[in-house]
Amino acid sequence: MVRLHLSGSFPRSEQLIEATRAATRGKVSPSVVEEAFRLDLMKLVQLQTEAGLDFVVDGQLNWQDLFRPFCELFAGIQLGSLVRWFDNNTFYRKPVVVDRVRFVGTALERYFRLGVSPTASAKKAILPGPYTFAAMSENTAYQSMADLVDDIAHALRETVMRLRGSGYCYFQFNEPYICFGNMMTDELDMLKHALGTCTKGLGEKSALQIYFGDPSSYLDVLLDYPIDCIGLDFYAMSADSLSGHDFTRELACGCIDGRNSLLESPTDLKRLLAKIEIEEGIDPENISLCPNCDLEFLPHGIAEKKVRILAEAREVLS
């Protein structure tokens, strides 16, 4: 049976948004905001559980962007200026590398918040990929990109090992930059080595998630990476791009559009899966369904409906 999971952050509810804005104005206490976060998280876990998703994420509800928490979790990084997040109307704080990057773990439990989930839930952690992290930072401390990527990879490895001890069993590394950086052979090798560092001896499921672009020109290289699953954005590339590749890894089909409020049809998702299985010859046991990227770009209610569409697609496929 095809597996289902989310692939990134989830939008906050109106109640949580109002609470955080009120706290910024000094109108409510931090405890009120924390309770609003807790309620949103409980509802998100319940939504995923009721939809029958195979792995549960915490939605990164208290993350301002993909990198911000790691300015606390890692030493050697400070917050920089606001920069546009690829071609979206959202922004991130550019990490500024001012010293050697190393894991310190400060506030780890605050940013990975699945303590409220049922103990039987299979927990999935969303993490920045080591190359994207390095490439989208301002480096003032390292003389070589390779050394920076390597230290970030070691810090991420410490992160995942701590999370594994807290019951996480699936680790996703987001690498959207590789579709925009015109990756050269040495850079692709650098990422391969870094992912090997992140996952060596992990003994749990790992994924490389690629979105906002088409990596098909070096897909064969990616398929040789030390990773269990590769997630692709089928709103940025065609399923035809899979032709001719020996897909030995699990394919996470990014077939729910996280940047468009139009609701997908479960029947259309079934047709996409049929094409991938029949025309491209990929074993259905190696396929999962997920959004192509974060759902945080969508209104909260639309994001909830898209989660339920994943469950409906499974029903159509069964």
Image (spheres, rainbow, N blue to C red):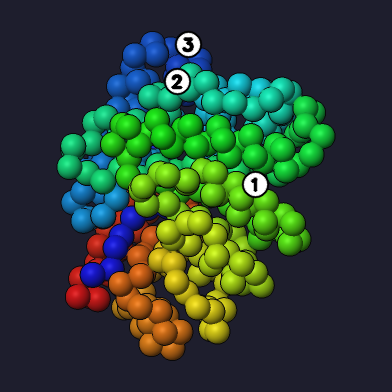
Viewer can see residue 271: no
Q: In the displayed image of the protein, which residue is found farthest to the right?
A: 143
Give the residue number, with chain letter if any, for mark 2.
Answer: 107
Position of residue 28 measured from the top left corner of the image (x, y, whole percent): 39, 13
- Where is residue 207 shown, x and y percent of the image? 45, 54
Q: State the CA–CA distance, disc 3 to disc 1.
A: 38 Å
Comparing 186 with 16, the one in front is: 186
Which element carries disc 3, helix, strand or loop? loop
At label 3, which amino acid type do we have? Gly
Q: Which class describes the residues within 10 Å of circle 2: few (<14), some (14-19), or many (20+)?
A: few
Task: Tell me the kind of residue under disc 1.
Answer: Tyr
Q: Residue furthest front?
A: 201
Label annotation for residue 26: 3
Q: State the SS at label 1.
A: helix
Q: Nearer the viewer, mark 2 or mark 3?
A: 2
CA distance for labels 2 and 3: 23 Å
Q: Earlier in the sequence, mark 3 or mark 1?
A: 3
| Residue under label 1 | 131
Taking the spot 19% from the left edge, 75% from the top edge, the residue there is 318
Q: Which amino acid type is shown beneath numbered disc 2?
A: Ala
* Coordinates of residue 291 in the picture (x, y in percent): 42, 59
Residue 255 versus residue 96: which sits nearer the camera? 96
**Is the residue under label 1 in contact with that under label 2 (CB below 8 Å)?**
no
The image quadrant that residue 252 belongs to is bottom left
